[in-house]
Image (tube, rainbow, N blue to C red):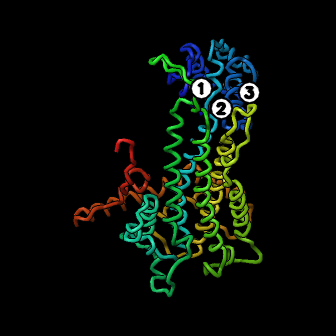
Amino acid sequence: MLFALRINVLAKGYSGISLKTLNQLIEAFNERCVPWVPEQGTVGASGDLAPLAHLALALLGEGQMWSPRSGWADASLVLKAHGLRPLDLKPKEGLALINGTQLITSLGAEAVQRSRVIAKQADIIAAISLEVLKGTTRAFDRLIQQVRPHYGQRTVAERLRSLLHSRVHPSEIAESHRFCNRVQDAYTLRCCPQVHGVANDTIDFVEDVITTEMNSATDNPLVFADQGEIISGGNFHGEYPAKMLDYLAIGVHELASMSERRMERLVNPAYSELPAFLVKEGGINSGFMMAHCTAASLVSENKVLCHPSSVDSLPTSAGQEDHVSMGGFSARKAIKVVENVEKVLAIELMLACQGIDLLRPLKTTEPLEAVHSFVRKAIKPWDKDRYLSADIEIALQLVKEGKIWEVAEPYMTHYFRTISCQETSSDVASPTASALTHDGGPPRVKRMKLDD
């Protein structure tokens, strides 16, 4: 993606680069020739100078390059194997190739996309845990969300209702404790709309800024041919993506923080009223004790990684670059935080499905039964201790690939259509539209423009 974003910036026509040079970059990209670029070495000041210099270096026939045909080899040999010639740079072109924020932005785009995939599935996994822990859906009532109408909060509440409310096949688990003496659930169950909701809103906000950055001219100086102007400025500064990716890490981390606390309730018989560590023959078997420990370690690691790197600045370039963004580290940390969140939620998925097994013969709702059945096709129930890492890896792949969402989405869509039809027939406005995708849906506050 780094290569593609650099081509996109140069193609805007503000970098003073020749069409011939740009086409050579495009040809190398289309041949899937990928320069070796280090992930460290940028302070996000005059752009990602060091990483982008390595990108240009390989296109000049030096350094290392990879392609499907050659694997890793000297760049000159890879270019030759694909019938490509090294760049022959003209005035301004060397500078044009190394100025910009494309390393930060490319890593940031990956972090945003993976965050969106995991955030949607976090709601499904939390719904299964709520069922196992015999929680109530009362806190997700639409009336509660309407008096605090944050977009993400309303969206998550709608998703949870679609997963936990079933008029055709109501949850037998929910019915089994309908008249219990509990008043309220723990916050990691009751406050899912509020906490998961702001994580979703964070992803939306960051995606908007990263998308703008991906499609911006970040070179310096910028050439405005139509106006006959060459102007030095600061579009290369990485503060925008740096701040956004620090914010993304903080927001997405909370999904794992909530998940780990739900896991504690699942493995603790004082909370779950199930066998300790979700295994029947305790003592002989440790069940999911170490799985929870693994999740706890990842959440603790994230707490350190969530410290924003963009609050730091070390002057460089003999004091000329006297404020830098440190955005490269913001991006790398964001990716690592997302990876850890994926793993934590994959572990919770395993524990929650085990809890459903222990509540049999009672059944949950149709969408959650479908998810449970899908997981059980890949991971068998836990009856006696076995090698755990392989199961975690399988669950992780299901989560990363969005498979849990794919299974539940058709049931959720049907629920929304049914509710919408009922409300339309009774002349009640429906705010449920697009709660699945987190696009559209409840109205947003209008963005103010300078001319408003």
Q: Is residue 169 visible?
A: no
Give the residue number, with chain letter if any, for mark 3: 72
- The type of residue carrying mark 1 is Asn
Residue at mark 3 to residue at mark 1: CA–CA distance = 32 Å
Choose between 399 and 223: the one closer to the eye.
223
Residue 75: x percent and y percent? 72, 20
Secondary element type, mark 3: strand
Q: Residue at x 50, y 87 (%)?
A: 181
Of callouts 2 and 3, the N-terminal one: 2
The answer to whether the residues at label 2 and label 3 have Cβ atoms under 8 Å apart is: no
Give the residue number, with chain letter if any, for mark 1: 220
- The type of residue carrying mark 3 is Trp
Q: Residue at x 32, y 64 (%)?
A: 419
10 Å crowding of disc 3: few (<14), some (14-19), many (20+): some
Identify the image quadrant of the N terminus. top right
The answer to whether the residues at label 3 and label 1 have Cβ atoms under 8 Å apart is: no
Residue 122: x percent and y percent? 54, 60
Residue at mark 2 to residue at mark 3: CA–CA distance = 29 Å
- The type of residue carrying mark 2 is Ser
Q: Residue at x 71, y 25 (%)?
A: 65
Residue at mark 2 to residue at mark 1: CA–CA distance = 8 Å
Secondary element type, mark 2: loop
Q: Is residue 54 visible?
A: yes
Position of 135 relative to 438 (above/below): below
Give the residue number, with chain letter if any, for mark 2: 46
Residue 390: x percent and y percent? 70, 56
Choose between 373 and 420: the one closer to the eye.
420
Secondary element type, mark 1: loop
Position of 239 relative to 436 (above/below): above
